Image (cartoon, helix red, strand yellow):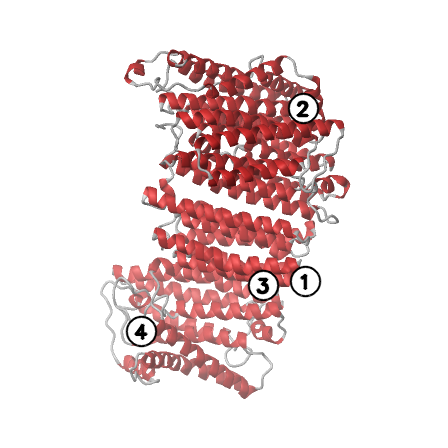
Amino acid sequence: MEDTLVLFFAFTMLYMSVASRLKSSIKMLCLQGLLLFLIFNQLSAHVETFNYIFLAFETLVIKMLVIPIFIWKIAKKNETFTDTEPSMPRFYSLVIATLILFFGFIFAAISRHHLLVTNPIPFGISISTIILSLFFITVRKKILTAIIGYIMMENGIFLLSLSIEKEMPLVVNAGVLLDLFIAVFVLGFLVHRIDRTFDKDTMDVLVQLKDSENDD
Amino acid sequence: MFEIITDIILILILPFLFIGVINKTKAFWGGRKGPSILQSFYDCIRLFKKGQVISNTASFVFCMYPFVVLGTTFFAALLVPFAFSTAIININGGFILFAYVLGLGKFMSLIGALDVGSSFEGMGASREAAFSAMVEPAFFIVMASLAAMTGNFSFGSISSLMTHAGSLGYLMIILAAITFFIIILVEGCRVPVDDPNTHLELTMIHEVMILDNSGADLAMLTYSSALKMVIFASLIANVILPDDLFFTHSLIYYLLIVFVIALLVGTLESAIARLRMSRVLDFIFIMSSIGLTILALVAVSLFS
Amino acid sequence: MMIEFILIFPLLSCIALIFFKNKTLSSCLLIINAIALLIASVTLCYALNNGIKIPSLVGHYFKVDDLNILFFLVLATVFLAVAIYSSGYVKAVNMHNKKATYYSVGILLFVFSMTGAVLSSNMALSWVFLEATSLTSAYLIYFEKTKQSLEATWKYVFICSIGISLGFVGIILLTASLPSINSLFFKDLYANPSLFNHLWLNIGFVFFLIGIGTKAGLAPVHSWLPDAHSEAPSPVSALLSGVLLNTALLLILRYFHILNIAECASYGKFLLICMGILSIFITCVFVLRVKNYKRMLAYSSIENMGIIAIGVGIGGIGVYASLIHLIFHSLAKSSFFMTSGNILIRFRSKRIDNISEIVRSDSYTAWLWMLCFVAIAGIPPSPLFISEFLIIKALFEAKHYLIILIFVILIAVIIFGIARSVINMSFGKSAKMDELDIVDVVKFSWTMYLPQTILLIILAISGVYLWPFISTMIKNAASLI
């Protein structure tokens, strides 16, 4: 059952590669939070109660509600609703996303034999999710989409920590969650400032600092 | 024997009924009464009685290609299981023959459209070629996954999927059904891929290819296009239905499923708008991507 | 109680500062914190060397051992220098009360998170504190609120957050490599070296090195460093270059120690040497064409981090040399940045071409600028000469002759590049000189000269004679890498 859920997680990443409206990307974030909660239910049957409640809270509330609503509020303040033309045509980014996902499965197959992972499919998909999020961050032009890519990378890392058999202590999970939360806050604040200062919120305004001609 | 006769009767009359149900559904959603269900049948008879107008610049290819299209589609229909779980011609690896016979028909229609010498048809031909090219990997991936799961390389494997399906099998069934449905939309030129009612240069794809055909040629092309839709609808029906049903039950369920698919196509056509040209490619290719991931999942689960 | 005191006192000072927004109070509290930190570090060092145990409530999570006492001492020294400098800086830049308060609060929080990262005895806890340093220093980099500093802050926070997340992947793979033990405390990790799965460990180290390496300023993941270190106010740049890069490097060294005791360090060493050489190469390319002197200093930080990485990667006496390089580079670089602050306030321009003949308007700054350069370049009596010499010796013993050649050539070119700019700025005459109006009515207080002088004196003495107890401490630390 968890293989199917992880597959749907991979499908959300595929959809992200063709989505051009910001709202669909944010909806994918919510969906990923929900899927992570369901996967976490399937995979860790032997977790003690407090840890379970905390992780459930983390996925359901923070990843599914708080962070997407925060990003949407920033989008409304910046009045960004669509992604401008990305650096490569959307079709090619879909092809590359498919190839990276396929590579994730190959990696899962390798890890089953040589690394003796007990949950190879979540492991492989999480690695390909991390690589795919880095790809989105580089290809897309809007800064807000870069933040969404960062959050998806964190989701992939969470999936990775679920797929390794060891259970992360509560302190570690709490720390990671806190850092993600505050980082998203700080990044959102900075995006708003960038939009206000530069009047444009694409990545190509961030070219002021150069080595060759730099005046103060 | 009896099954073969029933299948041939179905091949002959189902395409007209299919188009009729789609048009009736669209009329229903539009609040109209709509043409009767047998209207396309009457249209074909009328077209056979008329003469043909052929352009001066066209060559023998233009005169020949509707026959080739009709013949290949009919032959492809013989390869596919219809109401009963076995096809009329049952070959091991039949799906490859099927795909490329249809490809031959598609190729002939493309060059026939180009043969007229009008740039209008050329534009339609290029668009049609792109979309069909995107559909082919999806089809092959789905068939490869089915073959991997059941170990059987013919179309008969589709039906057997339902009888021994695990959770992965259900996923395969849903994936196969959705892929074939999208192929119906692409090959039959329905919304969201192409609008069959539009006659604007900006938006025509298939209609523009058959713009210069008239009379019996047009009748053959219309019938072939409808037959292609029925073929893929039969594939969906065979994926969903198990293969050990009694004769009459099998027929009734099959007709029911094809009827429901026609309803769905009509509803979809009324409900959503056609996608932008640049988005249609993404839409079609995402099916291949999804198919590829599921194939990879199947491979990792079964063969590791 | 010492460690709790170190951790709680900055937070209390922050709260006090937020209530009473006063410029002099903020400067005083900053200096008091720095002195307290220095006293605490010296006490902890003495206690560690003589085996005295100080009772502590959080002693499970925060511990001082041979390695991080060095880093902690460096942190305390640089912080004291920056605190003294800041008291003069705040006056010279004419910050009003509120802004000066926020400045001090930012620095205190930043130092608090760095202290936590250095002192913690749990891999995950130090990771959390490292991410906290990113977020607390973001405000400080954006302090000037210009367009360029906004862009620099964005790049800094974004790239460092991505890097630290990749570092977390490394930590996850580390826990996967040790099937039986479920804790991330360093003493548990170091206890059973033979149980580690080498493949997982190496894969985890790659992720960890790339991830935390972005924070440490190793090429090819260094791209945020020139922007962030040049756009921040000068005392903050001193802290960033002097201490933050060290803290990130400490984390890498902790992980590397696991590789060493599990005896699968060959791939990790190769990776460290590659990244080191790449860092020096990139610095060499860029320092010749850079036109902003603070960026030049930032690139020099990248080069020095590369040298340290090469030293650690070689092993043997290279590790000892790297630690010497680390300590004294922090002192030299922070005094370099603080002097650049003097120049920036006086000439109001960050371009090298706009500045010439500092010696005419402010001869003391000009001499400090030159002497800091002498310290950084590794010209004797700077101790960086000793460390670079020992690294070349270690490379000789390991028979990597090609690396020695590349190393020496690149460093020579870098010294030439920096020397050209520094000497032109200090003593060179320029035709543009008379057109620029120099703010020499501003008289800097003695606090803006004293910290650099003291640090340079320490460097000069250490370059000639390294006290034996310092040498022993460094040897003990090297055994923990």
Give the amino acid type for the residue marked by disc 1 in the picture: Ala
Are labels 2 and 3 assigned to the same chain? no
Where residue C459 appears, x then y in whole percent? 58, 17
Residue underneath mark 2 = C320
Q: Is residue B28 in view?
A: yes
**Helix, strand or loop at mark 4:** helix
How far apart are the two marked residues, 4 and 1, measured between alpha carbons? 66 Å
Give the amino acid type for the residue marked by disc 3 in the picture: Leu
Are labels 2 and 1 assigned to the same chain? no
How far apart are the two marked residues, 1 and 3, measured between alpha carbons? 12 Å
Where residue C344 appears, x then y in whole percent? 39, 23
**Helix, strand or loop at mark 1:** loop
Where residue A216 appears, x then y in whole percent? 35, 28
Residue underneath mark 3 = A38
From the image, state whether disc 3 or disc 4 is nearer to you: 3
Residue underneath mark 1 = A45
Are labels 3 and 4 assigned to the same chain? no
